[in-house]
Amino acid sequence: MKWLESSANTLGFIQLFAIVATIVGLFTFEFSSNALLITVLFYFLYSGVGISMMYHRYWTHKSFKMNSFLVWLCSFFGIVTGRGSIVGWVYVHRLHHKYSDTEKDPHRPPNYKKWKVFFPHLMGYGEKMNVFVVRDLLTKTHARIGKYYLAIVLGYAGILFVISPALFYFAWALPVAITNIMYNTFLVAGHEHGYTNHAAGNESTNTWPFGYLLWGEGWHNNHHAKPGNYNFGSKWWEFDPIGYLIERVKK
């Protein structure tokens, strides 16, 4: 299962490609109101629906059930963000919960440096993988996604580019770059800055900016305290848009 153990370099390449494309696009495309609306929409689809709802709450924690067509449609938006295959992402996150804030936490290894979260190939993700952690996801479909992950992402981006370079930029490069920068930054902030509502047995915190900018993901202390809940909010001001969406699409 080499596809499970060789994803970090792929993630680094896709994220770097999206960021470089974003920088080049700043001097190439006109930022109209429609273009910005498209960017916000796809940022929500990638970071909110794809990663937060599907990768995190559905595939990792299995906190709700949903129609199978919607499962794969919504999961596609997570796949094309460049944060890895479903199985690879779930593997890292399950280890993060099991070994949170210890030397075995994949987000905070012994040689942990904050800036490394922006360079996935330096974090050692996937080394000596224990497939038992993701045994429930070792299906032919997930194997194909993992094996052809780079082709899927670049193929999708390429189709958008053929349709329109501007569509490629505002519907993929820019929102994907923002998604990755936000989540990579959150890997640090979610265990170092903010406040706590619960004794979760680790250093997880709730952080205001990410609570809203990452569609509820920022209420991280709440999530670590009750990982099986699909709504991460606890206090009245901790609004969780993805939890609200799940309430309306779950079975």
Image (cartoon, rainbow, N blue to C red):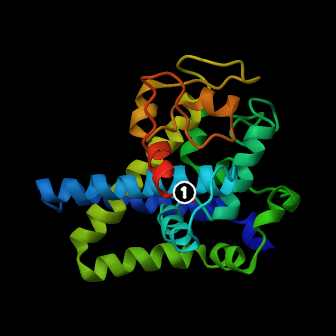
Residue 215: give x, y in percent of width and height: 43, 41
Residue shown at 25%/70% (left/top)? Answer: 167
Q: Secondary structure at mark 1?
A: loop
| Residue 93 can be seen in this image | yes
Which one is in front, 247 or 191? 247
Q: Quadrant of the N terminus?
A: bottom right
Which one is in front, 99 or 150? 99
Identify the residue position indicated by label 1 in the image: 250
Q: In the rendered view, does 21 fall on the left or right side of 17?
A: left
Query: Would you identify the image quadrant in which residue 210 lies?
Result: top left
Q: Quadrant of the C terminus?
A: bottom right
Which one is in front, 34 or 178? 34
Query: Would you identify the image quadrant in which residue 25 lies?
Result: bottom left
Residue 88: give x, y in percent of width and height: 69, 60
Residue shown at 44%/41% (left/top)? Answer: 214
Residue 193: give x, y in percent of width and height: 54, 20
Residue extending furthest front?
251
Q: In the rendered view, does 222 fall on the left or right side of 40?
A: right
Numbered marks: total: 1
> Badge 1: few (under 14), some or many (20 or more) residues near its Cα, within 10 Å?
few
Please state which amino acid type lies under the numbered disc 1.
Lys
Location of residue 201 with respect to 177 vertically, above or below: above
Residue 18: give x, y in percent of width and height: 40, 60
Residue shown at 43%/32% (left/top)? Answer: 239
| Residue 125 can be seen in this image | no
Location of residue 91 with respect to 160 vertically, above or below: above
